[in-house]
Amino acid sequence: MNAVKVPLKPGRSLMDWIRLTKSGKDLSGLKGRLVEVTEDELAKHNKKEDCWICIRGFVYNVTPYMEYHPGGEDELMKAAGTDGTDLFDQVHRWVNYESMLKECLVGRMAVKPIAAPKEISSTLSEEKKQLNGMLSEKGVLGASTKDVMLSYDWFQTDSLITIVIYTKQKDLNAELVIVDCQDKRLRGEIIIDDHSYLVEVDLYHAVQEDLAVNITEKVGKVEIILKKNDNIHWKMLGQPLENHNTFIKRTDRGQFYRKCKLVSKTEVTHDTKLFCLMLPKSTHLRVPTGQHVYLKQIIAGTEVVKPYTPVLPFLPLDFKEPSCHDGAHIYLMIKIYSCGPFTQALEHLQVGDYISVSNPEGNFKKSQVQASEDLFLLAAGTGFTPMVKLLDFALTEVSCLRTVKLMFFNKTEDDILWRNQLEQLALKDKRFEVKFILSQPTKDWMGKEGKISSSLLSEFVKRSSKYSKVLICICGPTPFTEQGVQYLKDLGYSQEEIHAFTA
């Protein structure tokens, strides 16, 4: 699951860039001075050999970064001499550009440049009404999705603090509630479509590690129950933090991370491992089917972030082991690249070490599957990862499904992830069928050969009846996904029937 990548020249890897930023070379072109940049000045620097970009009010000279950018020079040039914030948020919202580009900083904008027109933002205005933790309907009208009335309150006993969030959403479930409590900082986020409501306070007193979250789905009420460290009467819940009691677009929130402990690391194939991470006791988080998280690591003093889609510890056959869905663990299937600094750092993590994991992101909705009669999954290599939870959800919870087919592309037999489990599942469940396609098979291979093509797809992706509802999910390296989507459209499938997983 990656954004578009282009082949980089030798000596232009992430590590090479980090080395260059640490070399003391003048990358901003201003010998360490910071300047105030006007819009006119920014607009002048719009060529490959002289390229400045503004992100969130800060201007960077990205000229030296051109050859190191994994998305290629053309991608950067789209924002040359302008405010690239919106473009950046569409493609790389999770990348820590402050850390990656700190040596390229030119300065601040004198006046924030006008970006491409955006939808009306639902950020709350200064006059927002906050009455005992209540947001007035006026305050959240920008939300446009529907009139949302959100509020919170808190209560205490001798030993407990209970925070109650009233959402009035009838379809609230555990996947839409994310709670973290770290060093007296309590953060409770409720996801409502593409917006989120946040309660975030620095607590008045310390609390114990384990918290409880109760959700009353019918009325959309969320209770966060904390245990006091000392049986003291609290005068207040705590000090509100900057984004406390706000309801804004999720993309405007910024990423939040918590440290998770590596519990185990097991081999799946010669170059792919299954990592099991344990969430802190003070975190409530469920990663929805089809969504991904970001892992953050410090590599040579620079923060680097990569997206991964959680899987299950194994494919369920007849039984559901509670540990799959216990909510305390996140399982990630990760291919280790010999020259990839990020996966090499993951490979060197020891059991007991910690790694930062973000909130879930992604635009896949379960309702897309719930309405389907035929589900086709096209995966290449580790593009298989989003398909794992999808398979489990489809086969265990979607009653109208007639067929589920997985077409799995790999180079060699040794590269096939969970081959045995997939074959077992096909034997157990008559609705499920799996086809393996290899691009570099040995002479003994009896199955299909080749790469994704129109003829392979036309043979495989067929409606079970003339009017059956179809969903086709595709994930793999960018060229595979782009070609696959084009072939499917050529075969007459509509955009609504295709979901491409990207990050």
Image: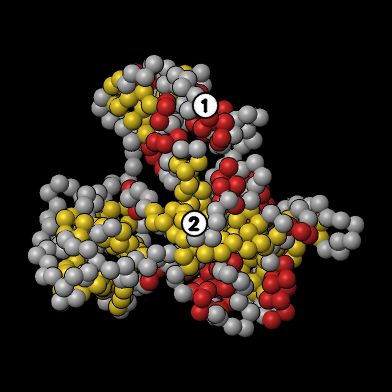
Image position, residue 291 (x, y; %): 48, 60
| SS state under label 2 | loop
Is 148 in front, or is 126?
126
Residue at (76% x, 59% y) in the render:
414
Residue kind at label 2, given as amino acid type: Asp
Q: Callout 1: 10 Å neighbours few (<14), some, many (20+)?
A: some
> What is the C-alpha distance between the residues marked 2 and 1?
29 Å
Q: Is residue 157 above or below residue 266?
A: below
Which numbered disc flags the more N-terminal residue, 2 or 1?
A: 1
Image height check: is 397 above or below 346?
below
Nearer to us in this view, 187 or 221? 187
Q: Is residue 105 visible?
A: yes
Circle 2 residue: 353
Residue 108 position, x and y percent, is: 30, 27
Which quarter of the figure has residue 461? bottom right
**Where does label 1 land, which residue?**
20
Check the image and report above or below for 344 versus 169: above
For the point 67% across and 80% down, the residue is: 429
Q: Determine whether the residue tagged by mark 1 lies in a helix, strand or loop.
A: helix
